[in-house]
Image: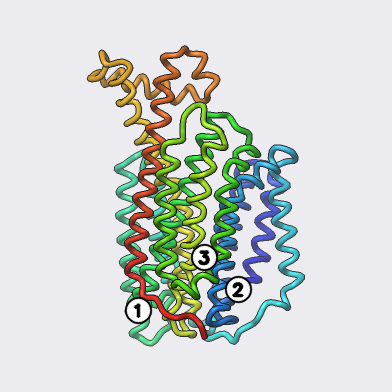
Amino acid sequence: MFLIGAALYGVGTFTAAISSNALMLFAGWAVVEGIAGALMLPAIISIISGTYSGERRTFALAIESVMVAIAAAIGPLFGGIMTTFLSWRYGFAFELIIVVLILVMQKRIPDFTPTESRSDLDIAGSIISVIGLFLLVLGILTLSEDITTSAGAMILGIIALAVFALFEIKRKRKGNVPLLDVGLFKDRNLRVGTAIMLLAYLVMNGGLFAVSLYLQSVLELSSFNTGLTLLPLTVSLLIFSLAAPSLSGKLNHKTLMAMGSILSIIGCLMLSYQFRMNTTMMDLLPGMFVLGAGLGFIMALGVDIALVNIPEESENNASGITSTGQSLGESMGTAIIGIILILGVIGGISNAVDTYAPQHSGDEQFHQDVYDYFQKIGNIDEIESQGSSVVTIADNIFQDAMAFVMQVTAILMGVVFILTLRLEDKNIRE
């Protein structure tokens, strides 16, 4: 499955690299690479879980989780270098080189005896689950455009997922192999660990999206400089995630992940005060570093603690659950934080008008005009050309909007902290 996914990923990235229009780029990047990733990610976790045990498995799963997080965090810097100095096409070409290396070194990947046959494939369950997840994510993505349609899509998605769960339960009772063994959710660590990973990836991807949008759209930083500004998060994420497996032998997974949650909350609160029109890289560095450190602890140990009670024969199924949680967090992060950013802008406009134009406090049309104008301004140079009063109002709006985003992410990490307290830790040394 992993090698099929890798080969398919090569096809997708090659298609994207030579794409001549947006549709071709979408097909190669979003569709083919997406399907390939779905084949590869659960297989990676399953291969690691089947190859190592005890403390070595903890370290191996930590590396896997960290690589996913590092890839997401370092993406803006790598993409910035490609687009600034070469071409965006080179980014896809670089991926193709990695795929070739994987295929060349495939004999070094451990192989395992299949536990099921092709006749056990749950095609109907696959279709129902895809429909449910698609509608749920689509509803979240369109939440800021059409609330009625969005709510309808999410409700239908939840209904489809409920039908999927019932279908899988009946399939197992009949003695057939289910696509998803719903009984695995009886394990608290798997439930809680998957929820933690979902929220952690939501916070990281959503936070990076909001910060990148601010740096590029408002401060007009280049892609390269935007990536450079985000680098402290990447560095601390790497340092603390690699340290986590060793520390887990002295403290435990639960304690370290709780500490990571607290650090992440502190990092979000530190950042909430830093977004103004004269913000510099040094202003963001402390908060980004602390946030990355906290996420490093959580992402390094989250998968391992989620799978700690799962029997060997069910690890491939449980791996699919954890990787789906990560993917959903990544998918929903941009949409949800984007909506929060819009709400923050609206709230910031109200605060700025009340403070600097009190004569229009109750004028809804004036508020809408400011919002429309604010959307058209776009960047710091255009704002400054409108005069000092507009600069003051815009600065206040930026600060309120980004502060709201960071406060919400802090709350989400607070939820993660509460979830970590529900984990059942075990001595992982063998």
Residue type for callout 1: Gly
- The image quadrant where one finds the N terminus is bottom right
Judging by the rendered image, the residue that carries numbered circle 2 is 1
Left or right of 288 in this view: 91: right
Q: Residues within 10 Å of mark 1 (few under 14, many from 20)?
A: few
Q: Residues within 10 Å of mark 3 (few under 14, many from 20)?
A: many
Q: Is residue 392 above or below residue 127?
A: above
Horizontal and vertical percent for residue 325?
44, 63
The answer to which quarter of the image holds residue 66 is bottom right
Residues tagged 2 and 1 counted as in contact (Cβ below 8 A)? no
Q: Please report whichever mark, 3 or 2, sits nearer to the chain's N-terminal start.
A: 2
Residue 155: in sight, yes or no? yes
Residue type for callout 2: Met
Q: Residue at x 72, y 53 (%)?
A: 94
Horizontal and vertical percent for residue 68?
57, 60
Judging by the rendered image, the residue that carries numbered circle 3 is 300
The local secondary structure at tag 3 comes to helix
- Depth check: 116 or 232 in front? 232
The local secondary structure at tag 2 comes to loop
Q: Is residue 93 above or below residue 53?
A: above
* Label 3, label 2: how far apart the Cα atoms are: 24 Å
The local secondary structure at tag 1 comes to helix
Horizontal and vertical percent for residue 260?
44, 59
Q: Residue at x 49, y 72 (%)?
A: 248
Left or right of 372 in this view: 80: right
Q: Residue 71: give its label.
A: none
In the image, which is nearer the foreground, mark 3 or mark 1? 3
* Label 3, label 1: how far apart the Cα atoms are: 26 Å
Q: Please report whichever mark, 2 or 1, sits nearer to the chain's N-terminal start.
A: 2
Q: Residue 183: give its label.
A: 1
